[in-house]
């Protein structure tokens, strides 16, 4: 049987109270991944024949998110969820098969649940199977009205009276429809309700009236069906997603000292015996190998970390760290940085587009930008690579075993040769050949006893 999905993502998300016109609700992120993408990822696991995403408000952003997963159609005016599904008619209405309809604002749904819903739909030869759950607080959701155990219709919150309001079984907004029947019924939909919208949920009663087989499929974990309508719900879903991801890594052999404050992105890979300490983010396409200690207070984004490193109080982006390094406290790296094995970089340093060789020390207060630093180099305290003249960036090289004295500035482009020695406080603007010593500062002059003379003069003046 052909299988399709339609994802509804055109709504404004009024309850998010955003002042921006270009941001759709479904582009709000959880752990760096937009709500819509969480849903699309779950669908991706089902090997469907086609995924159609309906975008509208803030649709340019939503379209960018959805494109890699399939087709995109526009709903220019948001006239309700039923109207949104109609937008997919040109692509799907004449197909035989089953169509999953879900909302772009339910990021906690899993592929496991979706595929169980599809199986139940097929096994029971249903024309419509809807995903429901029994929740403690059903407010805001459509309620499942049943008669003799069979679904009769769905009543939206706005149309609930006190009796219906007391129903705790809710519509998760996920349905498996017989595709042709779905589009047939949509043609007859009217906006006769409190919101004056074309409700997709009214299609359920239409199926029932046509005596088509309608069943509900109840989900065990109601957290999965949570729809994100406001920013409080966004925070609750973020915490739940964080909990799921962290649990998965803990089962896999990663220690989390405080999972409440560890944020691991969905595309991150961690390895066994690594310890994630409190207040740590690992996001983007990061990889962390075995036996590392990451954190406390560390942010890694698109970072590749080898084995046995210690990284604390650090902010690393687009960086590769090999093995056995000690990084931080207080290190910032960005833009294409590579730190080779056994390096020690920490205590208020910044690296940008830099390569730090094996066994190199860069221990205090330095800026190394657009530079290649060789092996076993000592970059002294407060060394600055002056890479920028206000218009262009230049590259410098510090070769193996060089020693750069504290407080020196290298004005790029320069090469400091192998085994050379730069005296503290030097301003280097010419290459230093291998094994040379460079000293580039004005010679010191001492005036014997003159400090005392000055002090006495000043004291006399005060009297
Ligand atoms: C909807 C369901 C409700 C269910 C709940 C589950 C309807 C009428 N109600 O309510 O029964 O319990 O989801 O979370 O379907 N959208 C469009 N175009 C529109 C309107 C909405 O694409 O014109 C999209 C939104 O972007 C969103 C989804 O449809 O992703 C659901 O819309 P939303 O307004 O959040 O519906 P709910 O009130 O939550
Ligand atoms: Ca919703």
Image (cartoon, helix red, strand yellow):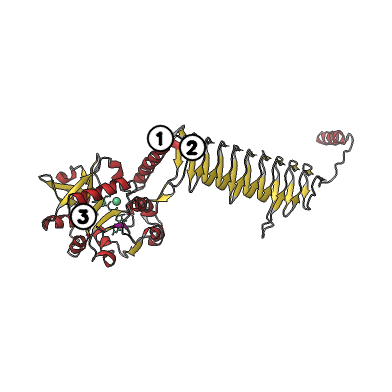
Q: Quadrant of the N terminus?
A: bottom left
- N-terminal label among 1 and 3: 3
Q: Is residue 282 magenta?
A: no
Q: Which mark is residue 251?
A: 1
- On the image, numbered disc 3 is attached to which residue? 201
- As for residue 7 lying within the magenta part, the answer is yes
Choose between 243 and 447: the one closer to the eye.
Answer: 243
The residue at which mark 2 appears reads as 279
The secondary structure that dominates the magenta segment is: strand
Residues 260 and 181: in front is 181
User: Tag 2's secondary structure?
Assistant: loop
Q: Quadrant of the C terminus?
A: top right
Rendered residue at 19%/49% (across/down): 123
Image coords of residue 259 (percent x, y): 43, 35
| Picture layout, residue 60 above or below residue 281 | below
What residue is drawn where x is 30% and y is 44%? Answer: 224
Residue at figure coordinates x 62%, y 49% from the top left: 352
Mark 1 or 2 closer to N-term? 1
Q: Earlier in the sequence, mark 2 or mark 3?
A: 3
> In the image, is the residue at mark 1 within 8 Å of ligand 1 by its beta carbon?
no
Q: Relative to residue 436, is residue 353 drawn left or right?
A: left
* Residue situated furthest right in the rendering: 448
Asked where in the image residue 65 lies, by quadrant, the reply is: bottom left
């Amino acid at each position: 049987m052909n299988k399709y999905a339609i994802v509804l993502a055109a709504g404004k998300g009024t309850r998010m109270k955003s002042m921006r016109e270009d941001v759709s609700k479904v582009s709000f992120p959880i752990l760096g991944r937009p709500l819509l993408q969480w849903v699309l990822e779950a669908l991706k696991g089902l090997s469907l024949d086609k995924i159609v995403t309906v975008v509208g408000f803030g649709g340019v952003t939503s379209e960018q998110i959805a494109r890699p997963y399939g087709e995109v159609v526009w709903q220019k005016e948001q006239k309700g969820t039923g109207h949104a599904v109609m937008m997919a008619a040109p692509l799907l209405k004449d197909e035989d098969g089953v169509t999953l309809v879900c909302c772009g604002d339910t990021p906690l749904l899993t592929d496991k649940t979706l595929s169980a819903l599809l199986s139940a739909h097929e096994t029971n030869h249903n024309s419509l199977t809807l995903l429901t759950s029994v929740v403690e607080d059903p407010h805001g959701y459509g309620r499942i009205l049943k008669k003799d155990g069979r679904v009769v219709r769905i009543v939206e919150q706005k149309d609930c009276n006190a009796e219906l309001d007391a129903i705790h079984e809710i519509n998760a907004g996920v349905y498996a429809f017989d595709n042709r029947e779905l589009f047939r019924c949509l043609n007859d939909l009217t906006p006769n309700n409190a919101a004056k919208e074309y409700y997709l949920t009214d299609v359920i009663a239409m199926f029932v009236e046509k005596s088509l087989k309608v069943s509900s499929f109840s989900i065990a974990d109601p957290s999965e069906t949570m729809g994100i309508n406001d920013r409080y719900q966004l925070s609750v879903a973020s915490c739940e997603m964080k909990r799921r991801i962290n649990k998965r890594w803990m089962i896999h052999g990663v220690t989390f000292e405080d999972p409440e404050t560890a944020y691991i992105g969905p595309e991150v890979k961690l390895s066994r015996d690594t310890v994630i300490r409190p207040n740590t983010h690992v996001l983007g396409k990061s990889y962390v190998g075995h036996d590392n200690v990451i954190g406390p207070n560390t942010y890694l984004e698109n970072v590749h970390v080898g084995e046995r490193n210690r990284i604390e109080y650090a902010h690393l982006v687009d960086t590769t760290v090999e093995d056995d390094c000690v990084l931080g406290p207080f290190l910032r790296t960005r833009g294409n940085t590579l730190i080779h094995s056994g390096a020690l970089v920490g205590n208020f340093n910044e690296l940008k587009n830099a390569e730090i060789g094996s066994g190199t020390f860069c221990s205090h207060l330095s800026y190394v930008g657009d530079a290649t630093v060789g092996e076993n180099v000592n970059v002294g305290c407060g060394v600055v690579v002056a890479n920028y003249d206000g218009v262009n960036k230049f590259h410098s090289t510090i070769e193996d075993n060089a020693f750069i004295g504290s407080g020196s500035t290298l004005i790029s482009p320069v090469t400091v040769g192998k085994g050379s020695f730069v005296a503290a406080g030097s301003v280097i603007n010419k290459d230093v050949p291998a094994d040379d010593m460079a000293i580039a500062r004005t010679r010191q002059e001492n005036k014997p006893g003159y400090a005392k003379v000055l002090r006495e003069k000043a004291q006399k003046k005060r009297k």
